[in-house]
């Protein structure tokens, strides 16, 4: 009986250790400062409507003299800088006779200095930076049209930004009998657009040194918006040294459903990846790209009521 009791206690201790290990893994994946929710690389909040100091709710209503504001925030938690078009966020609004919209108050929080400053136009956000854009609304400016009382007044918002991407991986060029080595990979961004690079991890040239090495790169849209434009997609790194590398076509596949792919770049090299003198050599394969992205943020539909 004593042996059985010791066995039960040992199993219980192991169960507790397993629970603690799972908790530690979960904690490492989540950001406790964000309520235990994993943050996105580019996090957008809003548009948020406030009337007389209180949130508007699902059915926003405002009166003649209510202080009414709309706010949009965007934060960069990724590794690559993001350039946000701060003056293109509000894309449609009501008739100016019904709701007047002042120039927005646009403020950037600089994570490196802890300072805030007023900005406008294209705003670059480094890792940890935040941009806040706030509009003050004036109901019936200059008297307005009282016949519009009770009508809804929709305003649409979007977020447009651009970003540079880098993805690199190591490729081992080796003789058949050489041992494999550990290889490293790096990507600057996994969302909302990821630059994917596909190639062999290990390449063994043939005796004629004419065996081709093929690499493919493409953009994959895993976010909620659309890739408006791919500005560039090009290879670099010492895998592609030499003049015997050719491009075998680029193709555009974007705006489909689900996970959408973008431009595809396929490059083939002959007579370049020769057998290394040492029997094994690690080379770097890198692709770089830049794109512009637009994400719909929805609308704020204000209803104006009398005092």
Image: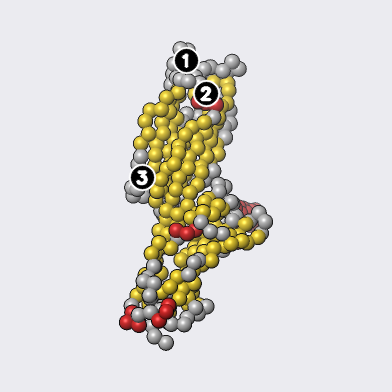
Q: Is disc 3 in contact with disc 2, using a CB cutoff of under 8 Å? A: no
Q: How much space separates mark 2 and mark 1, taking CA atoms? A: 15 Å
Q: How much space separates mark 3 and mark 2, taking CA atoms? A: 31 Å
Marks counted in the figure total: 3
Q: In this view, does 140 lie to the left or right of 27?
A: left
Numbered disc 3: secondary structure: loop
Look at 50% across and 29% down and name the residue there: 201
Numbered disc 1: secondary structure: loop
Look at 41% across and 34% down and name the residue there: 265
Question: Circle 2 sits on which residue?
Answer: 241
Q: Is disc 2 in contact with disc 1, using a CB cutoff of under 8 Å? A: no
Upstream in sequence: badge 2 or badge 1: 1
Upstream in sequence: badge 3 or badge 2: 2
Upstream in sequence: badge 3 or badge 1: 1
Image mark for residue 254: 3
Look at 42% across and 79% down and name the residue there: 142
Q: How much space separates mark 3 and mark 1, taking CA atoms? A: 37 Å
Q: Where is residue 268 in the image (x, y as percent from the top left)?
A: 43, 25
Residue 102 vs residue 60, the one in the foreground: 102
Quarter of the view holding residue 219:
top left
Which residue is at the far top? Answer: 208
Question: Circle 1 sits on which residue?
Answer: 209
Q: Where is residue 280 in the image (x, y as percent from the top left)?
A: 58, 21
Q: Is residue 32 visible?
A: no
Bin the neighbour count of mark 2 within 10 Å (Cα to Cα): few under 14, some 14-19, many 20 and up. Answer: few
């Amino acid at each position: 009986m004593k042996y059985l009791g010791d066995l039960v206690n040992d199993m219980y201790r192991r169960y507790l250790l397993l629970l603690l290990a799972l908790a530690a893994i979960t904690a490492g994946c989540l950001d406790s400062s964000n309520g235990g929710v994993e943050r996105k690389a580019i996090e957008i909040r809003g548009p948020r409507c406030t009337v007389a100091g209180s949130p508007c709710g699902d059915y926003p209503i405002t009166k003649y003299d209510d202080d009414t504001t709309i706010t949009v925030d965007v934060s960069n938690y990724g590794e690559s800088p993001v350039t946000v078009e701060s003056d293109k966020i509000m894309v449609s609004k009501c008739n100016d006779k019904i709701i007047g919209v002042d120039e927005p108050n646009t403020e950037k929080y600089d994570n490196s200095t802890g300072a805030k400053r007023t900005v406008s136009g294209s705003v670059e956000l480094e890792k940890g930076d935040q941009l806040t854009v706030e509009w003050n609304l004036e109901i019936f400016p200059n008297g307005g049209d009282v016949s519009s009382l009770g009508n809804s007044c929709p305003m649409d918002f979007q977020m447009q930004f651009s970003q540079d991407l880098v993805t690199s991986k190591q490729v081992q060029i080796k003789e058949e009998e050489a041992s494999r080595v550990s290889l490293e990979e790096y990507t600057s961004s996994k969302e909302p657009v990821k630059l994917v690079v596909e190639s062999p991890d290990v390449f063994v040239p043939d005796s004629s040194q004419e065996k081709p090495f093929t690499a493919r790169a493409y953009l994959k849209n895993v976010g909620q918006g659309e890739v408006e434009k791919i500005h560039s997609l090009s290879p670099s790194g010492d895998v592609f040294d030499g003049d015997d590398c050719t491009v075998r076509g680029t193709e555009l596949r974007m705006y489909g459903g689900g996970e959408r792919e973008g431009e595809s770049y396929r490059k083939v090299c002959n007579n370049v990846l020769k057998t290394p003198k040492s029997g094994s050599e690690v080379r770097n394969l890198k692709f770089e790209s830049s794109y512009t992205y637009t994400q719909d943020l929805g609308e704020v539909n204000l209803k104006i009521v009398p005092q």
